[in-house]
């Protein structure tokens, strides 16, 4: 459950962003990398989700993780602090559940 209806934001982003073109622009050299960062409100942990050219690797530091993943809408919404539900638990916000999923997948 969220306090605000973020469906209009999701709809607008779905209509106007083509996430498939990110890799095309990276491959052509027009982009080197793109990154969005989401923070977990309860843990203070942040995850920077990035998509880039070959040779870029993830990282892990105190309360910060860098995860090389194909960017997608839910990660962008998480980085914007827009409360959306993702798998990860009842009432989880995108940022906390995205952070938790990334941390679990790195173990």
Image (spheres, rainbow, N blue to C red):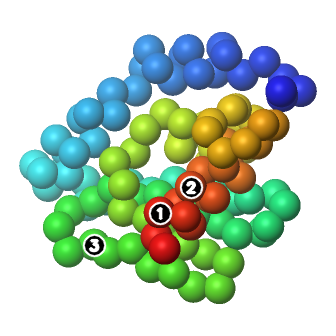
Q: Secondary structure at mark 2?
A: helix
Residue farthest along the right direction in this orientation: 3
Q: Is residue 11 left or right of residue 21?
A: right
Q: Secondary structure at mark 1?
A: helix
Packing grade of label 2 (10 A; few <14, some 14-19, many >=20) is: some
Choose the circle earlier in sequence order: 3 or 2. 3
Residue farthest along the left direction in this orientation: 28
Q: CA distance from mark 2 to mark 1?
A: 6 Å
44 is higher (above) or lower (below) than 81: below
Residue located beneath label 1 in the image? 105
15 is higher (above) or lower (below) than 27: above
Q: CA distance from mark 3 to mark 2?
A: 21 Å
Check the picture and name the quadrant holding the N terminus. Answer: top right
Which residue is found at the position 59% from the left and 21% from the top? 10
Choose the circle earlier in sequence order: 3 or 1. 3
Cβ–Cβ below 8 Å for labels 3 and 1? no
Q: Position of residue 67 (x, y in %)?
A: 44, 65
Closer to us: 104 or 76: 104
Cβ–Cβ below 8 Å for labels 2 and 1? yes
Residue located beneath label 2 in the image? 101
Residue located beneath label 3 in the image? 56
Which residue is found at the position 78% from the left and 18% from the top? 5
| Tag in front: 3 or 2 | 2
Packing grade of label 1 (10 A; few <14, some 14-19, many >=20) is: few
Which residue is found at the position 24% from the left and 35% from the top? 21
Which residue is found at the position 56% from the left and 66% from the top? 103
């Amino acid at each position: 459950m969220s306090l605000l209806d973020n469906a209009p934001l999701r709809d607008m982003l779905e209509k106007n962003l083509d996430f498939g073109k990110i890799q095309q622009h990276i491959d052509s050299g027009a982009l080197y990398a793109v990154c969005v960062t989401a923070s977990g409100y309860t843990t203070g942990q942040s995850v920077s989700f990035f998509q880039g050219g070959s040779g870029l690797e993830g990282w892990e530091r105190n309360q910060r993780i860098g995860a090389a993943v194909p960017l997608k809408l839910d990660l962008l919404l998480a980085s914007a602090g827009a409360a959306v539900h993702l798998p990860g638990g009842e009432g989880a916000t995108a940022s906390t559940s995205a952070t938790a999923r990334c941390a679990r997948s790195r173990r």
